[in-house]
Amino acid sequence: MEKMYYEVHEGNGPYLLLIHGMLSSRAQWKRNLAALAKETRPVVMELWGHGRSPSPDDPALYTPEAMVEQVERVRRELGAGQWFVCGQSFGATVTLRYSLLYPERVRGQIFTNSTSALATKDKVKDLYADVHKLAGNLAKNGQEGLRRMRIHPIHAKRLPPGAQQELLADADLLSPAGIAKLFQITSPVASVAEVVQGTKVPTLLVAGEQEERFTPHRKYAEENIPGIKVAGIDGGHACNIEAPEAFNAAVLEFIRQHS
């Protein structure tokens, strides 16, 4: 059985699952782990085609439901009755869906700016109109095709000193074939916007307020996720890296409230 890679960090308190976004890796959380470990036991997971995870050939493993089952597998292997989950960007498509399907397993969920998780049907069609062209480009150009994508960390401009290098250190591990499958198979059906009203677990959105394009999606979340709390912080899309102290403080306060 193909398995997504995960690692458990030493800490105190409940398990906290952390899933990065597209073209990132476990390095996404490097500036958060020490603070979060003071009151949680962080569990860092890498998506198919990213970091140390494989890139399965079976397209069925790339469905949102199959990716949720990878998360549930990790919970069972840890022996955790309940835990907290946190998704960054594309990772939020997995954690938000997991909480919808397994609310009894989730003490609370956190997520950051995620267009892919909150795009409504009309927006999804526009966002992923060119996924097959993208997949063809990656098949032809491999790593160079990945580096040309605007979301590749090589193009990051807002990160604090050293953070870009941390992400780039894992960038060569990205699998063009795995990324192509995520875009082709997962992305067009990854959004939970149409079902997020059914959320039954405590929810915190840590919103990077400098990313203006996320503003309508933040509003959608505030209007459609029952009981959601929002912590706006001075950062952009990768707000947990750009403003780590504010992100860590917001997450830990939420965890204290629901532990």
Image (tube, rainbow, N blue to C red):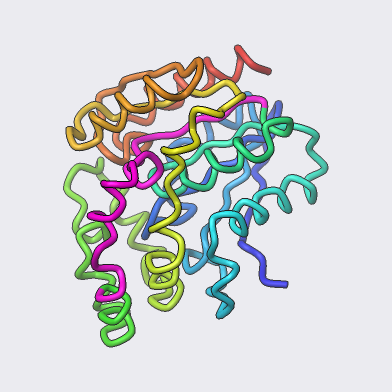
Instruction: Name, please, the residue furthest toward the top.
Output: 257
Quadrant in which the C terminus appears: top right
Q: Nearer the viewer, residue 249 or 214?
A: 214
- Image coordinates for residue 52, horizontal then vertical, percent: 55, 66
Please tell me whether residue 109 belongs to the stretch shown in magenta. yes
Residue depicted at 48% across the width and 69% down the height: 49
- Image coordinates for residue 67, horizontal then vertical, percent: 59, 57
Residue depicted at 32% across the width and 76% down the height: 135
Please tell me whether residue 90 belongs to the stretch shown in magenta. no
Segment tinted magenta in the rendering: 107-133
Which image quarter: residue 161?
top left
Q: Is residue 49 visible?
A: yes
Quadrant in which the N terminus appears: bottom right
Instruction: Name, please, the residue furthest toward the bottom.
Output: 140
The correct choice, above or below, for 3 with respect to 226 in the image is: below
Q: Is residue 173 visible?
A: no
Residue depicted at 24% across the width and 26% down the height: 209
Q: Is residue 92 left or right of residue 68?
A: left
The correct choice, above or below, for 70 with respect to 88 in the image is: below
The correct choice, above or below, for 181 with respect to 117 in the image is: below
- Image coordinates for residue 210, horizontal then vertical, percent: 19, 30
Q: Nearer the viewer, residue 21 or 182?
A: 182
- Image coordinates for residue 113, horizontal then vertical, percent: 34, 36
